[in-house]
Image (tube, rainbow, N blue to C red):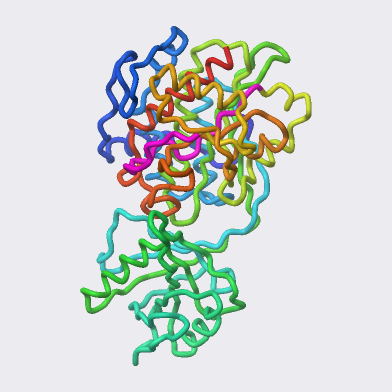
Amino acid sequence: MTDRSGLSRRGLLAGVAGVTAASALTAAPAWGADDLRPGAVNRPKLDRYDRQIVSGLSSERALQHLQVLSERIGPRIGGTQSEKRAADYIAGQLDRFGYRTRLEPFPVADKFLAQITDVRGMLPDDLCWQAGAAPGGKLDVTVEGPVRDVGPATAPVWPAEVAGSIVIADDTAAARPALVAEAAARGAVGVILLPADQVYPRRASAFSPTGLTSAPIPVIGVAQVQKRLIREALAVVTSLPLKISTTAHRGLISNNVIGERRGKADGPIVMVSGHYDTVPGAPGANDDGSGTVLTMELARVFSRIPTDATLRFALWGSEEQGLIGSRYHVAQLAQDQRDRYRAVFQNDMVATSWDPAVTYWLLSFTGLANTATDAVRAAGQRLGYDAQLVGPVQRGASDHQSFQEVGIASANFSWRGELAPSFLEPPYHSPEDTIAKNVSLERLQVSMELIGCAAYAVAR
């Protein structure tokens, strides 16, 4: 039974079938319990407990949840209605699995977002066109006009016709106020600021430009891929009219979603978790839709398997703003609750299809091994993946850090480039973080098996 208030989830629950039908399913992994897994060097040697987990997991079911989160809802910005829709959907699924489910609300900062609409249909429609809006620009408005490219903001080249147009310029923070003031004085109806390209494999994300005060026109910041596509279109069409809308989201409440099945009284607690929010402009299929649906699918499988430990499945809100949701949750835990935690398995970016992401990293905020890393290492050995697992390596920046800061055994698990855990896929935090461009069902399946077998070994 879920303890919460807010919007009904009926529309989303009813829409799952429609989303699944509309999106062609990628071929699901097909291997037997004793088959060599893709990328593994050894055949698995599973015990009877592992087989219970592996036999029940379905990447197709996980994909259906991911389609709702990434395609139907899209970017899930902390505290906004899109994040709340996702929270309600996740809570509804945990309800169906039989967990005691609750939303854990907490306040977060205001958000300033923008949406780009392509009037002529010249830009790709398989890309997210959400962007960030400047809090110091004009908000809660919609403007339309042809795009005029003035080049670098530090030395703009103004065309003869600026009035009624949307100006685009290569952004420099120090030059923003002067550029926007000049654009407004020349009659522009809006400004789109373009980020500097980052070094591969990084790509710049959408951003909310700062440093402006009471600008009379809307000002937005786009992602690197959006910048490229706008300029490519300008190179081949005589006119590219766009519509931009800005929205201020104020007085925001974000939510953690937590499902629990109680074990023995005062017994240990084992948690599997991910974060379900995204950055502006990113559908978040891998970051962290993949960790979210891994957690949901394991919750489904574990709902039929008895354990001595209390099981908690947690999806954190507002991780992208600085681990706000998980830190809030940990702060509410009394010491006797903290003492009961045996392990927290945090899953963040567990399904990228980026070819170089061949290493499964065990990431510990302290850099030291603990119950969570040891359990996943042992599960990897049983599944034949020992050579692909690296760690524990010292790294925070995901929700495991919130638990390790107070002495709870936790770690983050993620597929990344083999040179270092900082080598994340190019679609990271970008409009291209979609199922089609950035999700491998094989890697998702392997991730579910690794965490499921590890969590069961600790919980049973």
Q: Is residue 244 above or below residue 371?
A: below
Q: Quadrant of residue 458?
A: top right
Pick the quarter of the image with the C terminus. Answer: top right
Residue found farthest to the right: 335
> In the rendered image, is residue 301 in sight?
yes
Pick the quarter of the image with the N terminus. Answer: top right
Foreground: 203 or 26?
A: 203
Where residue 350 appears, x then y in whole percent?
Answer: 43, 36
Based on the picture, tell me whether residue 398 belongs to the magenta stretch.
no
Residue found farthest to the top: 48
Where residue 170 appears, x then y in whole percent?
Answer: 42, 75
> In the rendered image, is residue 312 in sight?
no
Foreground: 143 or 305?
A: 305
Foreground: 188 or 33?
A: 33
Q: Is residue 157 above or below residue 290?
A: below
Based on the picture, tell me whether residue 357 belongs to the magenta stretch.
yes
Where residue 97 appears, x then y in whole percent?
Answer: 50, 21
The residue drawn where x is 56% and y is 29% is 345
The residue drawn where x is 46% and y is 80% is 153
Q: Does residue 199 appear to the left or right of 321 in the view shown?
A: left
Q: Is residue 67 above or below residue 259?
A: below
Q: Does residue 453 appear to the left or right of 370 in the view shown?
A: left
Range of the magenta residues? 342-361
